[in-house]
Amino acid sequence: MNIKAILGGLATLFLRREQCPDKKILKAKGVCLWQIRAFFSMAILYLFYSFCKYNLGAATKDIQAEFQLKNQSIGIIITVFTIIYAVGQFINGFLGDRYGPKRILIIGGVGGVIANVCFGMSGTLTFFIVFWAINAYFSSCGWAPGSRIVFNWFPENRWGTWMGIFHSLCCFGSFLVFPIATFAISLWGWRSAFFVCPAFLLVMTIAYLWLGKSSPKDAGLETEWRQRDEQKLVKRAGGREYWIAFTNPKMNLAYILGFGANFVRWGILLWMVKILAEPVEKGGFGMSLINAGWITSLASLGGAFFSILLGVVSDRLFKGARWQTILVAFVFGSLPLFYIARGPVILSDPMGIFLLGTAMFVSGGLIQAVLTPLFALSGDILGREISGTGVGIMNGWMYVGASFAGVFLGWWLDSYGLTSGIWLMGIVGIVSGLLATLIQK
C-alpha cells in the first residue's frame, strides 16, 4: 500500500487546495491551507492552555499531603479559580470581538505561564489561592476568542463541525495533561507539574505570534459567504451588542445547561484522580496515582472523540437544531457515572479496570463533548459578529457552575463520602439533559 499516495489523496480530499483563493476569495465549500493554518495554530495553542488549568487536579493529592489541607481547602482554590475564570469569560469574549481574538489569546498564554510558575514556587494556602486566581483570568482569554476565530474562518453551515474539532483538541489537551503531570510529579515532586506544563504553552504562544490570524481579512482575503443583512454587521462590538447577548432568552436557557455541564465536567477533572487514588478505607478506590491519572484522562480522550462526532451530528443529522444532540449527550454521559459510583467493588471483577476505563471514556467524553453544540448555539442565535461575546458569556455562566464543583463538591465529599459526589454529578447531568428539550430552534 502506497502511504504517500494515501496522504496525497487525503490532502486533496480535505484541503481542496484548488479552491484556495487565487483571487483571494475563500470559497464556501472545501477547506484551503489558510483556513487550516489559522484554525490549527489557534486550536493547538488552546490545547496547551489546558496544560495550565488541569495540572492542579494531578497535583492535588500531594499538595494536600505536604500542607495538611482538607478537601474543602482545595475546593476553595478551585472555586476562586472558577469564579475569576467566569468573570474573565464575561469580559474576554467581548474584548476578543472588540480588539481582535489573536491579541487576547497571546495575552492569556503569557499570563498563564507566569501564574503557573508562581504557583509552583508557593508554599501557603494564601499564595496558592492568589496565583491560581491570576491564572484563572489569563486562562479565560482562550476559549471565546478562539471560538470567534472559528466563526470568522468558516461558513455557518460548518460551525458545528469545526467547533467539534476545536473542542476535540481542547479535550485532547486535558487527556495529555494528567499522564504528563503525574509522570513529572513521580520524578520531581508536585511542583514540577507547574513548571513542565507551562513550558508547552510558552513555546506555542511564541509560535502563534507568527502563525495566528484572527480573520480572513487579516490575511488579505475575502470570503464567498456573507451574512444576510450586511447593514446589521457590527464593526466593533459595544455595550448594546453585549446586552443583546446577555439577555437573549434562548441563550439564557443555553447558559443554564452550560452551568450543569461544567459542574459535572469539572467534578470529574478535578476530583476523580483523588477519588480513585485514595485508600479504600478512606472511601476511595485504592489505585496508584499514575493509574488514577490514566483512568481520569480517558474522560478527556472520550471528549476528543465525541466532540467531533457531536459537531458533525448537529450539523448534518439535525441540520443545526442542536437541542437533540445536547439531550443525548447529557443523558448517555450521565448514566455511566452511576456505575462508577458503586465504588471500589467494581474493581473486584477481572474486567473491573476495563469497565471503569470504558465508563470514564463514555461518561466524561460525552459530558465534555456536549459543550460543542452548546457553544455553536452562540453563532446560530446571535450571529457571527457578536458570537465571541455570546461564547464568553456562556462560558462565564458555565464556570459559575464549575465553581460549585470546587468548594461545594469538596464540602460534599468531606460530609457524605467520595462516591456520593459521583452520584450527585450523575443526577445533575440527567436534569440538565431534560432541560435541553426546551431548546427548539
Image: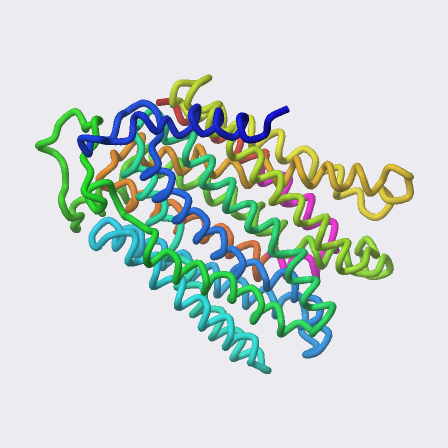
Residue name at image x 69 percent, y 62 percent: 182
Question: Front-most of 38 and 254?
Answer: 38
What's the residue at 38%, 45% (across, down)?
A: 394
Residue at screen point 65% across, 37% down: 363
The residue positioned farthest toward the bottom in the image shown: 123
Q: Say whether residue 265 is magenta.
A: no
Which of the 4 image quarters holds residue 108?
Answer: bottom left
Q: Position of residue 229 (x, y in %)?
A: 13, 27
Q: How is the image coloured?
A: rainbow
Q: Position of residue 285 (x, y in %)?
A: 81, 53
Is 380 located above or below residue 173 in the figure?
above
The answer to whether residue 27 is left or right of residue 438 is left
Q: Is residue 428 magenta?
A: yes
Number of numbered discs present? 0
Does 73 sit left or right of 96 as displayed? right
x and y percent of residue 409 in the render? 61, 56
**Quarter placement of the C terminus:** top left
Q: Residue at x 57, y 78 (%)?
A: 125
Q: Is 272 in front, or is 99?
A: 99
Give the image location of residue 351, x and y in percent: 87, 37
Viewer-proximal residue among 422 and 391: 391
- Regarding residue 409, the answer to whether it shows in the image is yes
Q: In this view of the protein, can residue 437 be seen by the observer?
A: no
Camera-nearest residue between 59 and 222: 222
Residue range corresponding to the magenta coloring: 409-429
What main secondary structure does the magenta stretch of the protein show? Answer: helix
Q: In the rendered view, would you say 88 is above or below 380?
A: below
Residue located farthest toward the left when viewing the structure as drawn: 231
> Is residue 314 left or right of 58 when viewed as pictured?
left
Locate the N terminus by quadrant.
top right
Left or right relative to 227: residue 440? right
